[in-house]
Image (cartoon, rainbow, N blue to C red):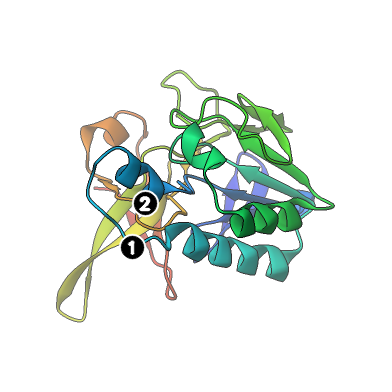
Amino acid sequence: MHALEFVGTRLCALSSGALWWPERRLLCVSDLHLGKSERMARRGGGLLPPYDSRDTLQRLDAEVARLDPATVVCLGDSFDDLAAAGALEEDARLWLTRLASGRDWIWIEGNHDPGPPGLGGRHAPELHLGPLRFRHIAETTAEAGEISGHYHPKAALDARGKRVRRACFLTDGARLILPAFGTYTGGLDVTAPELRALLGPNARAILTGPTQVCVPVG
């Protein structure tokens, strides 16, 4: 994990792409996009192997089991659309129910899933906790302490003579943008103008993966 000081709080950017707030025992994940393969098949798009939801839930389950959070915040686009939430297989629904049991489980609304998913937990447009503001899409005029997702940021890195791209956290000290946690999610390069417009000087990317690397966003 990569520890960072963020507007007076100590947070941990985990190698999985999840965010951990130890003081509050709060785990935050963004852009699970559960049901993506079902949604693409339903709408006549390209076919994906129908295991994306299971793989995403396995990785989320591992973090919940390891950290035992009191609160879990799903930072929007938890489902590829609301119909995908309704079409989840029964074992996936039971899996989510088990993970949420005994915790404050919060679904933040995203652009893919603007309404309650019809599962356990509670639904909110955004969440304010202490100095932090959790929402799905970053606001250009947001106060310091904003945590968001939506853009699925990725950064390129030269490793052993090869150019690789990894999902990453992005922060300039005032805002923090999480990577997508879901399987089969694409990504936007950190140099994209949409992300450059949001970040102040001295922004950095914290790459996910077994060996985390923090690099400046140039």
Q: Is residue 144 above or below residue 48?
A: above
Which amino acid is tagged 2?
Ser
Kindly indicate the quadrant of the structure image that contains residue 155.
bottom left
Q: Position of residue 56 (x, y in %)?
A: 50, 60
Residue 121 left/right relative to 205? right
Q: Secondary structure at mark 1?
A: loop
Which amino acid is tagged 1?
Pro
Question: Residue at point 68% right, 40% down?
Answer: 119
Task: Tell me the residue that label 1 is attached to.
Answer: 49
Q: Position of residue 193 (x, y in %)?
A: 22, 33
Task: Tell me the residue that label 2 is attached to.
Answer: 37
Question: Residue at point 74% right, 51% down?
Answer: 100
Q: CA distance from mark 1 to mark 2?
A: 7 Å
Characterize the local packing of mark 1: few (<14), some (14-19) or many (20 or more) Cα atoms within 10 angstroms: few
Residue 112 left/right relative to 134? left
Question: Residue at point 37% right, 44% down?
Answer: 203
Characterize the local packing of mark 2: few (<14), some (14-19) or many (20 or more) Cα atoms within 10 angstroms: many
Q: Secondary structure at mark 2?
A: helix
Along the line of sight, which residue is nearer the eye, 114 or 92?
92
